[in-house]
Image (cartoon, grey):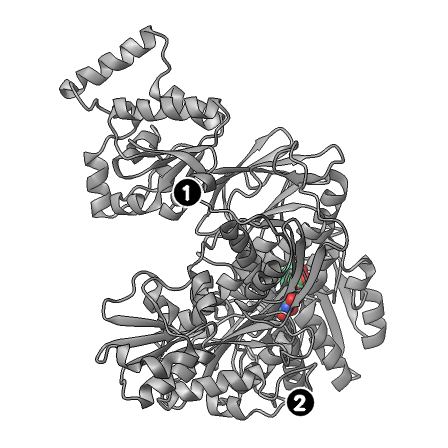
Amino acid sequence: MKYLIVGGVAGGATTAARLRRLDEECEIIIFEKGEYISYANCGLPYYIGGTIEERDKLFVQTPESFGTRFKTEVRTMNEVTSIDRVNREVTVKNIRSGDSYTETYDKLILSPGAEPVRPPLPGINQDGIFTLRNVPDTDRIKKFIEERRPKHAVVIGAGFIGLEMAENLHQCGVNVTIVEMADQVMTPLDYSMAALVHQHLKTKNVEFFLKTAVSSFDRENERIVVKLNSSKTIKTDLVILSIGVRPDSRLAREAGLAIGETGGIVVNEFMQTTDANIYALGDAIEFTNPVTGTKMITYLAGPANKQGRIVADNIVRGNVKHYHGSINTAIAKVFDVTVAATGVSGKQLKKLNIPHISSITHSSSHAGYYPGALPMSIKITFSPGDGRLLGAQIVGYKGVDKRIDLFAEAIRRGSTVHDLAEIEHAYAPPFSSAKDPVNIAGMVAENILDGTTKIVSWRALADNVPDDDYLIDVRTRDEFELGTIEGAVNIPLDEIRNHLNEIPAGRKLVVFCGVGLRAHVACRILTQSGFSEVYNLSGGYKTYETANQKQGNEDIFEHNYIGKDDNIYHGSQEKAPAPFPEAGKIKEVNACGLQCPGPVLKLKQSIDQISDGEAVRIKASDAGFYNDVRAWANITGHELLDLTQDGGEITAVVRKNKPQILNSSARGGDGTTLVCFSDDLDKAIATLIIANGAASTGKKVSIFFTFWGLDVIKRRKKPAVEKDIFGRLFGLMMPASSRNLGLSKMNMAGIGSRMMRRVMKKRNVDSLEGMLQTAIDSGIELIACQMSMDVLGIKAEELIDGVKIGGVATYLERTESANLNLFV
Ligand code: FAD
């Protein structure tokens, strides 16, 4: 028998090896259009980052070693260009010589993989913009980094590979900005889980823009100018396009094989295409998702390798093995956190109208009392009727891999949450807890299913707490002080039995604590005391707070400068770092293993025990501590001298300052903020005059353009954008750009504004457009109000370059550091 294989990496090489192990006599030829076969795609980002030091380690086999071991002819740099199914022969182009030839087959195996998406954006083909798919791509990126020593890179697309690249570039000493079109990174995750990753990326000083697309690329000297759809531009040295991949099904399509709705090659349960003599596998095929019953493609090495074995067995032994599909089990290291998912996410189930319940639990990687326990957040989705497990996601530090594999196997076997509660696991304190996080996820889900607990999701409270809800925060008073959900009353768990009379009967009670455990106890007390509508906030305040925080991390490199030593520094060159207290005056505190707000409370107690000027060095493992300690130092007036995170352990050094009362003016800086609400020409000019004047005195100035004020920053020549009927109507009724603004008084159908412009020109006063340019040049921040844009149907592309889109939180944040706030 003669077998031809197209593609010599994950699927192709595995199939060839198994074929040979089953049939010593057959003839096997692998065609690979690239130079290499059987290499570790998954290791490429880590070779770029330097974790894998030797390039040779990427190659599992060379064409020669593979050929010898498996008696296989490996033809690299040979591309199969067409398939003649009638005569069972392929046409092959030898890329080195340019010659074409044909080769016949008894069975043909297609494992051509996927190709990266490279959208036709203006300027995308210039030097310094890369995709990463194979070894030559890797060599090009590595060489670019070694020769050009980039200081900054933009990674477009925040999928698993995009984030791995972000981490590895960061490891090379490159500042990284990620641009992602979705409102979250890693789309297989649900938003609340991705929010944990966002907060972690912030601690690593990775800049990222969410809900933002790249519209074009330009060049300014040596640098690439990345233009975003928000009108912002980023100047960078290197761009990695990681927008996604699509199945490489061209060959199959042209040969008349069936291609599915997802673009993948259609195969039956034996992995045969619509031609019985042609099998296909890997990234290029479409199959049925065993959980949802819908068609899907998976771009993962595990399935490709396992399919290779099935294909070889079916070819040699005659269709003896069924392929049961994959459930997209994936894992990635994102700096210090491990992110994993399997099965179907909540948002995907919602999209497919599949009834489901979601539950979030926060556990520890092992027993909290044994040193080194780190947090682990788990979200599972399951069927409301029988409790069948549909999906699981985990964000944590240690032990995520073994838990996700348990969930994956449970899903594949059709297990229920009751099975999860009973899963037997090996336990000793360094490895797990007597109830493993997987058991806990199952037990909580069981409680939901059998009605022991009713839950609400953080989303139910995200925008507005419904009027009828009565929120009870059962954490301690100290925890409550540090932050809670607006409107919540604080009744600590251990006091709740004494306050039952004060809790309104007949209202819906939403109870919450840090992660959901204390609230569960409180819910049980309340339910058994006669309250009927009692709900636990799933995932507790931790999930609510993480998901409701600002998710993006924009403009963090704005004030960076390159020092004399060629390193990148943040802030003003003149400002010296605050000195540490001398040795012996720093109290060492270990708060590892404590969940939020334990570390902050421990910090407070420790600070209370030292004298002014002395410091506390505190180590914590709770991820939220990174932000909490900053906020706490701000609120209390103590000084945060250092804050680092390494492998899930956060270390902060806080110096005790004399007690001080921080009033608003003391807290405010010397910045200036202006709200431009009006599109009257005179008011717009006044706004710009004040702003430019303030900027000239060295103040940090921000102008927030809201409602009619947006007309001031509209482009004159706007690109065509899609609008709904209201957007189009508003567009017709409102001034097209700053050139069409009228005066607030004596406009006289536009005569007044034209007169005003003429007089200004005569008196050598800059025009409104000139003032806007001056504002941009002098670093004034122009913020367009997102909400007003949505209401008026104004798109980011219609605004002038240099405008940032922001919400009211952005504006309020700026007012915090300003002592002059004006509304025009
Ligand atoms: P590939 O392994 O891509 O092999 C296809 C080969 O076919 C290519 O070498 C191509 O040159 C060749 N070919 C295509 N057309 C022709 C033709 N007409 N003639 C001759 N040759 C042809 N997966 C994970 O599970 N975990 C990870 O951590 C992970 N990390 C990754 C990191 C990176 C940077 C990349 C690029 C991928 C990663 N993957 C990961 C995905 C994984 O590598 C793929 O899912 C897997 O390699 C798919 O196997 P395949 O055989 O279908 O395709």
| Nearer to the camera, 66 or 430 | 430
The kind of secondary structure element at disc 2 is loop
Q: Position of residue 688 (x, y in %)?
A: 36, 25
Work out whether 508 lies above or below 434. above
| Residue 351 showing in the rendered view | yes
- Which residue is at 17% across, 20% downward? 747
Percent x, y of residue 573: 65, 33
Q: Quadrant of the C terminus?
A: top left
The residue identified by callout 2 is: 426
- CA gap between label 1 and label 2 equals 55 Å
Q: Looking at numbered disc 1 in the image, what kind of residue is underneath it?
A: Ser
Name the residue that disc number 1 marks: 664
- Position of residue 358 relative to residue 619, above or below, is below
Residue at image coords 72%, 68%:
30
Q: In which quadrant of this rendering is ligand 1 seen?
A: bottom right
Going by the image, does 815 lie left or right of 406? Answer: left
